[in-house]
Image (tube, rainbow, N blue to C red):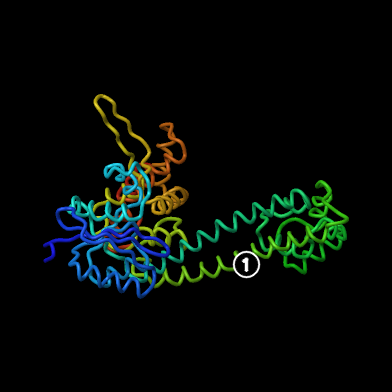
């Protein structure tokens, strides 16, 4: 006979997953390992069904494993990795990582505290696809920033004149210049007249003349010439081509993001926010999601976004500190929006300005503003209506007060 209620914990990994099934007394009924494949996940679902598992705990909210569990109509609860790490000492593991032990911890916490844990409700496929796109774009942007920094360091040693020649080293005109003149030796061919002609052919639309740019190039320290120049030029071209490829892929993703955002049912809500733009609106939507039950109150969204401070109290000691335990991607998305919103909304500028006047540093003032915006965004999101400045009472009161 099987226990009336059984629970499972899955320690997720790239190639295989440790699974532990326990009964409602915490007794281990079965431990298995399944490979990360279609056949392995199908076997996992069959095994859980045969063990009459009522709920499954796992450390991540997405991926093929979670998709298979939800498709099998199992109740899935996500317990963050940092929580599992903190719980290891409760089970006498001295904080050491062990896949089989972590699977048991997940199952046992689900058994003892499952009534406090909210089951996973997946977002719509359109939201998942949008989230994948905006996160991939962010990764590519970070990769491009790193490559540009490496190119700048390389040029500072072998071709210093190219570093500050144009406003941005990753701009199309800078990439075109370095493709044609990847070394100081090749750039030595340029004269003011030749530089002017090359700029015209390259479609340069900047304000500086060829003579001015040529003078800037000549005023810089001399680069490396002579033996080995061809190798250094090849290194420059390698960086430039990689940056160009990343820039093109980022542009392609941004086009797809704009298309998905325009088609999304909640797209109009987030694009209506001041200075939200396309990518910023898509990022906020993707990180918040479309499941209204996930955030039953604005306070729930505020805490998960790290916009609410954490209060620690013991005896007569009370400390209000930065909230480290939060969804960092969600926090970054909302803070990025809030920081720029103050340039397009008087209410946001007032909140930020008053926070700065109280002595708050910029990051703290942005979090204060993000917390205020979350209440507005949550209401619009719950009601499925775009943000309307005319209906924003606090903004109207501020406008009337300034006009009086």
Marker count (numbered): 1
Task: State the residue at coordinates (13%, 65%).
Answer: 2
Percent coordinates x, y for residue 287 in the rendering: 38, 58
Q: Is residue 247 above or below residue 151?
A: below
Percent coordinates x, y for residue 7 in the rendering: 20, 59
Residue 343 located left or right of residue 22: right
Where's the N terminus, which quadrant? bottom left
Figure quadrant of residue 143 = bottom right
Percent coordinates x, y for residue 309 in the rendering: 33, 39
Q: Which residue is mark 1?
A: 245
Where's the C terminus, which quadrant? top left
The answer to whether residue 292 is seen in the rendering is no
Q: Is residue 63 above or below residue 39?
A: above
The answer to whether residue 180 is seen in the rendering is yes
Q: Residue furthest top?
A: 316
Of residues 45 and 350, which is closer to you in this image?
45
Task: State the residue at coordinates (26%, 63%).
Answer: 121
Give neighbour class at mark 1: few <14, some 14-19, many 20+ (Cα, 10 Å). Answer: few
Task: State the residue at coordinates (32%, 53%).
Answer: 102
- Circle 1 sits in a helix, a strand or a loop, which is it? helix
Percent coordinates x, y for residue 156 in the rendering: 74, 49
Residue 297 located left or right of residue 61: left
Of residues 124 and 62, which is closer to you in this image?
62
Figure quadrant of residue 269 = bottom left
């Amino acid at each position: 006979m099987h226990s009336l209620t059984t629970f499972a914990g899955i320690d997720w990994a790239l190639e295989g997953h440790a699974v532990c099934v326990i009964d409602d007394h915490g007794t281990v009924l079965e431990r298995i390992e399944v490979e990360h494949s279609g056949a392995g996940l199908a076997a996992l679902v069959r095994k859980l069904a045969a063990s009459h598992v009522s709920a499954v705990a796992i450390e991540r909210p997405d991926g093929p494993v979670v998709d298979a569990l939800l498709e099998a109509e199992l109740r899935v609860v996500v317990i963050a990795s940092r929580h599992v790490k903190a719980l290891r000492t409760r089970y006498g593991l001295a904080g050491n990582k062990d896949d089989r032990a972590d699977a048991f911890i997940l199952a046992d916490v689900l058994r003892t505290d499952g009534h406090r844990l909210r089951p996973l409700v997946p977002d719509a496929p359109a939201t998942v696809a949008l989230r994948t796109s905006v996160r991939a774009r962010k990764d590519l942007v970070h990769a491009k920033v790193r490559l540009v920094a490496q190119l700048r360091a390389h040029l500072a040693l072998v071709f210093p004149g190219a570093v500050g020649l144009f406003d941005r080293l990753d701009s199309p005109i800078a990439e075109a210049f370095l493709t044609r003149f990847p070394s100081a030796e090749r750039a030595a061919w340029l004269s003011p007249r030749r530089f002017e002609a090359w700029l015209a052919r390259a479609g340069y639309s900047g304000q500086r003349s060829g003579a001015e740019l040529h003078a800037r190039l000549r005023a810089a320290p001399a680069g490396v010439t002579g033996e080995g120049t061809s190798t250094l030029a090849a290194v420059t071209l390698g960086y430039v081509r990689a940056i160009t490829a990343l820039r093109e892929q980022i542009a392609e993703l941004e086009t797809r993001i704009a298309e998905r955002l325009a088609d999304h049912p909640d797209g109009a809500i987030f694009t209506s926010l001041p200075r939200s733009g396309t990518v910023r609106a898509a990022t906020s939507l993707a990180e918040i999601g479309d499941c209204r039950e996930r955030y039953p109150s604005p306070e729930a969204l505020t805490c998960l976004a790290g916009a609410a401070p954490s209060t620690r109290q013991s005896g007569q000691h009370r400390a209000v500190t930065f909230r480290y335990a939060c969804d960092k991607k969600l926090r970054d998305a909302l803070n990025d929006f809030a920081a720029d919103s103050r340039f397009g909304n008087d209410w946001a500028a007032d909140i930020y300005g008053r926070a700065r006047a109280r002595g708050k540093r910029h990051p703290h003032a942005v979090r204060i503003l993000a917390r205020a915006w979350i209440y507005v965004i949550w209401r619009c999101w719950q009601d499925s209506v775009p943000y309307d400045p005319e209906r924003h009472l606090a903004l109207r009161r501020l406008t009337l007060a300034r006009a009086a």
